Amino acid sequence: MLTRLKEEYSITIETLESFSTYWIDSQSGLDWNCIFVLPAWVTVWLNHFGKGMTPYFYAGWHADVLIGIAPLLIQNGTAQFVGSADVCDYQDFIAAPGYKQDFFALLIEYLRQQGISRLNLGPVRADSAVFSNFTTLAHNRHCMLRSEPEDVTFELNLPATWEEYLQGLSGKQRHEVRRKMRRLHEAGDITYRVVSESAAVRDECAVFLELFRLNRSDKVAFMTEKMAIYFQSLVQELAHRGIVRLGFLELDTKPVAAVMFFEYNATIFLYNSGYDDRFSSLNVGLLSKIFSLRHAIERGCKKYDFLKGSEVYKQRLGAQPVQLLRYYADLC
């Protein structure tokens, strides 16, 4: 459906299939920099948690140039991102550089025409397109706007070498990292292996889920049968796209800790982790993350995103906080 809003600008409502096609098309010109709104992710979320919901993929155009996409759910006149905060750490709109303000102005006008009176957008990063462009435009168009802090994510710009990373830590933390790694190596034969091939990731997801449930009661409560099936489907879909990785820390060939992370746009996203608490005295949970950091540096990645949560270890490993916010906008 094509709705003309002003000369040479228009909105179309796309299907999930065409939404996916725009992502795959490297010539689309859009900034696909938020992993939690990638079509592959959205597809899995809708399949597992979107029963009874109708997603709307609003695409903005300047003549025949695609300038942005807003994946939204609409309920009782309120629009929100496709997804949920329990499995999507933060979200954003997808827009083309140089067209972001045009796209957001177009989107606000279109949503008003469709009788959508309220937006509930979050969590979003403080450097997101929503924060940087959309909220300013909403304010200028006399939308009532309110924001509130929701959480925090931590990220680290990666140096070229592991030794350079260690030198960037405080003296105390550098000593602690080296001491913990030395104690672990003294305990037995240590291997850290990363699984990235699609079939292997799918096959070893069960090992990750077992380790995820082993060390904390809240993780056991979170990883219900429904959630485990979601994780398996997410791993399978993103492995097919070459994005997901499983990192296993093994002691004498036995998996004692694991991390699930995504490698996308030269960034590592640490999505989840688990460890066997029988080996907690060796700090295997923390060390599995440290090994994944070293792996990221060796891969030549530029950034490591620890994702949502204010756990103290993230700062100790050199990461800096980025505020996550939720925005409410009344469009009337």
Image (cartoon, rainbow, N blue to C red):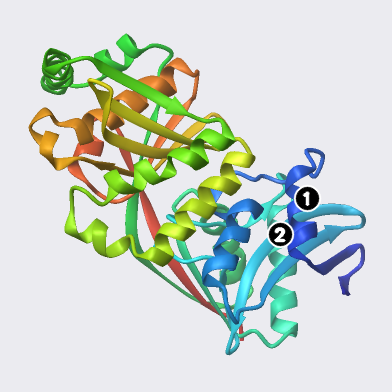
Q: For label 1, count other residues whose C-alpha is less than 10 Å away and answer few (under 14), some (14-19) or many (20+).
A: some
Say which label, 1 or 2, has the lower sequence index.
1
Q: Is residue 67 left or right of residue 239?
A: right
Q: Is residue 9 left or right of residue 67?
A: right
Q: Is residue 34 visible?
A: no
Disc 1 + disc 2, Cβ < 8 Å: yes
- Residue 63: image x %, image y %? 92, 57
**What quarter of the picture does the C terminus occupy?**
bottom right
Q: Is residue 247 left or right of residue 71?
A: left
**Total marks in image:** 2
Foreground: disc 1 or disc 2: 1
Q: Indicate the amino acid at tag 1.
A: Tyr
- Residue 177 lies, with reference to residue 118, above or below; the image says above
- Residue 13: image x %, image y %? 79, 70
Residue identifier under label 1: 22
Q: Indicate the amino acid at tag 2.
A: Ile
> Which residue occupies the foreground of this view, 11 or 143?
11
- Residue 280 lies, with reference to residue 34, above or below; the image says above
> Which residue occupies the foreground of this view, 74 or 93?
74
Within the image, what quadrant is residue 160 found in?
top left
**What quarter of the picture does the N terminus occupy?**
bottom right
- Residue 267: image x %, image y %? 50, 33
Q: Secondary structure at mark 1?
A: helix
Residue name at image x 48 percent, y 52 percent: 232
Residue name at image x 53 percent, y 67 percent: 48
Residue identifier under label 2: 69
Q: CA distance from mark 1 to mark 2?
A: 9 Å
Q: Is residue 78 left or right of residue 192?
A: right
